[in-house]
Structure formats: structure tokens, C-alpha cells
Amino acid sequence: MYLDRILTLVSNLIPLAGVWWWGWDVFQVLILFWMQTVLVVAFTLAHIHKLPATALGDITVNGVVRPATHRDLLLLIGAVGLVFCAAHLLFLWVIFSGDWSKRVHGPVSFWQQMVIASGLWAPLLVALLAGMVGYVLTPPRPAFARRLGVRMGLADGSQSPEDLGNLLLGMFKRIVLMQVAIIFGGMLANSYGSMAPLMILIGLKALFDLGSGKPLGAGSGRSAVR
């Protein structure tokens, strides 16, 4: 099933229309990509939460090695993701905000002006749907998805759960490589002040998303990690 890939493609095509027809600027596009990165982190946490306890590996606390729990990993990865996203937003705001800093004065005005009024909610909503579909389709699947698959004559998909190591690797590789490309692409578009670099940036980001080959927030393998 490729519904999640189709939704990912759509969420990357909408910014092209935003730049071409609705006049989105560099900062709006970069903020959209930042919000999609937040979704990557959120769905990675969701994937970790549904992993069986036997797939969580070990963790060292005060020099003592013990089996990791869902709470351990959710707190650790959540904290890392929060720090990364906060630092990246600060960087984008300082470098690219321009006149937006005069219109946005807090979370409420950010949401009203940056997301709702400008239309960024549309690709963000599609990206959210892609992540939800990916969450449902990636083993271990929720009970309702397994029952639906059986009724449709599809494989149960409850075996071979996503591997924790590759799940985390996929998240960090995705957010780091994507954000580095976005930062330099944004600087290029800002410097030249033309639409072409921004269109190229959106196209490259779309290719990166589709080339990952996995649902939003999912990893890329199944090997056991301890």
C-alpha cells in the first residue's frame, strides 16, 4: 500500500503552489518544513510507544545496565527531539524571520498568522495524515488495522516489528540531513531573492522525503539491536 507515499508527495507539492500562486516567502516554507520535522519526531515517539518491550534493548543508568522501558526511551528521545526542534526554530527565526517578527508575538499569533492565514495548514494537515497512515501500516499494527487487513484479505503484519535502532537512525538521519539542506537552500534563496532557488529547495526536499522509502517517522530496517 502506497497511500502514505501519495500523501507525502501531495504535502510536498502544495508548497510549490504556495510559492508560485500564493506568494509564500522563504521563511514560510522553512517554517512549514520545521513543523514537518516536529511531526517526524512525534511519530517516531508514537512508533517507539507501540514496540514490544522485548524490542527496546538495554539502557545504562548510574552505571547499571538494565532493560529499557517505554518510559525511558520516550523521555530520552522526546527530550532530544524537543531540544533539536527548539534550537532549529530559534535559528530560523533569527536568520530568516524578517518582517514576520513584527507580526508574530507569541504562539497564538504564530498559529493565526503563520499557519492559518497563510495557508500552511493545508500541507501540514496532509503531512499529518501521511504520518498517521504510516503509523497504522508499520508493524506492529494496531488491533483495528490487523482486523481490517484480515477482512480485506491482507497479511496480518503483526510480525517482524520495526527495529528500535533503525527507527532512531531513520529519525536522526532524516531531520539532520533534511534540515542542513533546508538551511543552506534557504540562505541561497534569501541571498538571490528569486523564486528559482526556493522552488529547487522544495523539489529537493520532496525527493528526499519520497526517497526515504518509509512512512513518516519510521525507520529503515528490521535487524535486532541490543
Image (tube, rainbow, N blue to C red):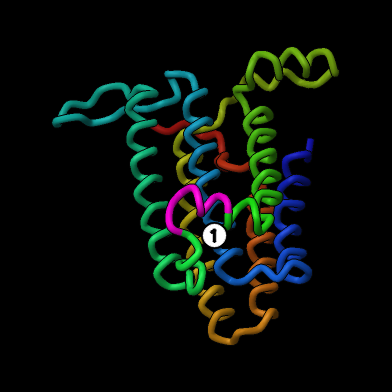
Residue 176: x percent and y percent?
46, 58
Residue 93: x percent and y percent?
43, 65
The residue depicted at 85 percent of the width and 18 percent of the height is 152
**62 or 226, nearer to the observer:** 62
The residue depicted at 52 percent of the width and 30 percent of the height is 46
Helix, strand or loop: magenta stretch: helix
Amino acid on which the number 1 mark rests in the picture:
Ile
In the displayed structure, would residue 4 be above or below residue 34?
above
Residue lying farthest to the right in this orientation: 152
The residue depicted at 35 percent of the width and 22 percent of the height is 69
- Horizontal arrangement in the rendering, residue 103 relative to residue 139 (left or right): left
The residue depicted at 41 percent of the width and 26 percent of the height is 56
**220 or 189, nearer to the observer:** 189
Write the start and end of the magenta stretch as one range: 105-112
Quadrant in the picture for residue 27:
bottom right
In the displayed structure, would residue 174 be above or below residue 62?
below
**136 or 111, nearer to the observer:** 111
Tell me the crowding category of disc 1: few under 14, some 14 to 19, or many 20 or more residues within 10 angstroms, Cα based: many
**Residue tagged by mark 1?**
31
